[in-house]
Image (cartoon, rainbow, N blue to C red):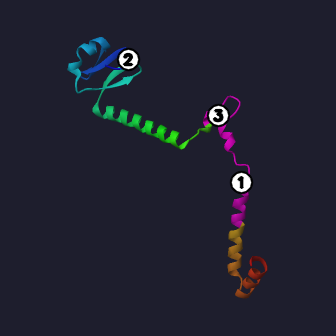
Amino acid sequence: MVKYAPKKVFVLENGTYLELSYAQFHQQKDTYLGRYFLPLHGMLMEVSVDAYKAFYCEQRRQKYLNERSNDNGDFSYDMLTTDDFNGEDILVDTVADTQGQAERNLLLDKLRKALAQLSVDDRELIQALYIN
């Protein structure tokens, strides 16, 4: 017996679904042994073995993810979102200057290429004055 009595039960008969009350289903339960049923919206629905396994596999996976999340103390910033405030706005990095960093990297690449074109004496002089 289940925790609650479903409103209806849908049983596959000759490729079509037959609607039964839970009382009717329970009276004939021996007829449906070996068949697979999923609880959907307060009702039971007969499904294939593959659909049954996929459903409970996904439920177990979600339960596992929730357990891991609780163990790790994960927190969703989306939970802070209201009509007036977006929770993800807390994560904005105001310190990082990506554009400036990209420009600096381009200039460093140009500098390396220019240094490679210098003579050995000039390169040593620049290293002695600016790098070391």
- In the depicted structure, whether residue 119 falls above or below residue 12: below
First reached walking from the N terminus: tag 3 or tag 2: 2
Instruction: Judge depth for marks 1 and 2 and give the one in front.
Output: 2
Question: Quick one: 124 or 75, which is closer to the camera?
Answer: 75
Q: Residues within 10 Å of mark 2 (few under 14, many from 20)?
A: few
Q: Which residue is rendered at x = 29% and y = 30% of the image?
A: 48
Residue 92 in the image: state x and y as whole percent: 69, 45
In the rendered view, does 50 fall on the left or right side of 58?
A: left
- The residue where tag 2 is placed is 4
Give amino acid for label 1: Ala
Give amino acid for label 3: Leu
Instruction: Judge depth for marks 3 and 2 and give the one in front.
Output: 2
Q: Secondary structure at mark 1?
A: loop
Q: How many marks?
A: 3
In the rendered view, does 22 fall on the left or right side of 76?
A: left
Does any portion of residue 122 appear in the rendered image?
A: yes
83 within the magenta span: yes
Q: Secondary structure at mark 2?
A: loop
Question: Quick one: 85 or 30, which is closer to the camera?
Answer: 30
